[in-house]
Every structure is written in structure tokens, then in C-alpha cells.
Amino acid sequence: MENLTDEELMGLIVGGNLDMMRHLFQRYNIKIYNFCIQMTKDKDLSKDITQEVFYKVLKHRETYRQNKFSSWIYAIARNLCKDYYKISNKTKRLDDKGLKYTSEINETRSEPLANIRQLNIALNQLNDSDRELIVMGKYQGLKYHEIAEITNSTLGAVKTKMHRAMHKLKDYYFLKTKHHEL
């Protein structure tokens, strides 16, 4: 089953072979969790949302329309993260606890921990939509056309928004770095 594409596996699941879900779970569990933790800054909540994403994939499998599976599952995760913000009626801001968890995600990177912390602080300064674009594009490695599909936007709009978001991130990062050096 390892040689089947995500879309082929989802086709089997839609056809009633629910055992194939474990393969998609293995492929996407960590990716979806990492996306959620970057958006919520809450480890336990991210676990819950990740579990809910896979529940919704199974529950709504009949609505899957042979699109790119990764775009579909990220759209589900994105919507659940947005629902969290609507329900809680507030945006959680990054604190030392959140930094610890985002640092765990980045533990395989070679940058010093201080740079990762500064980047995460800068990332947290962005509004939710800019942070979401950067997380999807730079942290999750999604292509612009996939982000456009997930966000129901055009490719050109995603490129423009990403460019602006990256400039904002860069400004916040260097402002924080410069302030840190003073």
C-alpha cells in the first residue's frame, strides 16, 4: 500500500475499505499536528484538532471529489483551527510554553535555539492569515497552488500575500533581533 498515492488510498476509503485510513494517518499525522501547533500554540489542543481532522476525513469521505488529498486534509485542519479561534473568541499569543513546543518541532534544524525563538516570536506578531500562509508554505512545504486551493484563493493572490507576509516576518524578526542586541 506504500506505493499508492494519497488520492488512490482515499478512493479505496470512499469505496468502503476503511483499513486504508491507517496509511493516510501515518503519512499525515505529524504534518497536521505540526500545522495545528503552529496555528494554536497549544500542544494538547493540537492533538485534539489532529484527531478531529482524521475523524472528519472518515466521516465526510463521501464528499471527497478526487482532488489533491493534501489540499483537502489541510483545508479541514485549517477550518478546525479557525473554528477554535471563533469558539474561544481570542487568539492565543506565543509564550514560553508555546516556544518550548515550537522548538521541539524544529529540533532537527541546525539554527541555534535563540534564532528559532526569535523567529517564532516574529511569526507570532503576524496576523492569523499571514501566519497561516507562512506555516503552510515554509513550515509545511506546501506549494503555492496547494495553498490557493486550501484557502479558496487564486495563485496570484497567494503569491502576493506570501510575499507581503514574508516581508512582515522579516521586519518583525530583524526588529526583535536588533532590540535583543541592544
Image: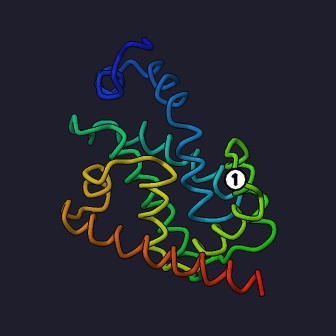
Number of marks drawn: 1
Give me the residue at 43% from left, 36% from top. 58
Give me the residue at 70% from left, 53% from top. 111
State the quadrant of the C terminus. Answer: bottom right
Give me the residue at 65% from left, 76% from top. 92
Q: Residue 137 location in percent, x, y?
A: 42, 55
SS state under label 1? loop
Residue 179 versus residue 55: which sits nearer the camera? Answer: 179
Q: Residue 42 location in percent, x, y?
A: 70, 62
Which residue type does callout 1 highlight? Glu
Give the residue number, with chain letter if any, for mark 1: 111
**Horizontal placement of 181 versus 89: left or right?**
right
Q: Residue 178 location in percent, x, y?
A: 68, 83
Q: Which quarter of the picture shows residue 67?
A: top left
Name the colouring of the figure.
rainbow
* Neighbourhood count class around disc 1 (C-alpha, 10 Å): few under 14, some 14–19, many 20 upward: few
State the quadrant of the N terminus. Answer: top left
Q: Residue 24 location in percent, x, y?
A: 46, 28
Give me the residue at 81% from left, 70% from top. 96
**Horizontal placement of 100 versus 1: left or right?**
right
Residue 16 versus residue 146: which sits nearer the camera? Answer: 146
Up/down of 3 relative to 118, above or below: above
**Horizontal placement of 21 versus 43: left or right?**
left
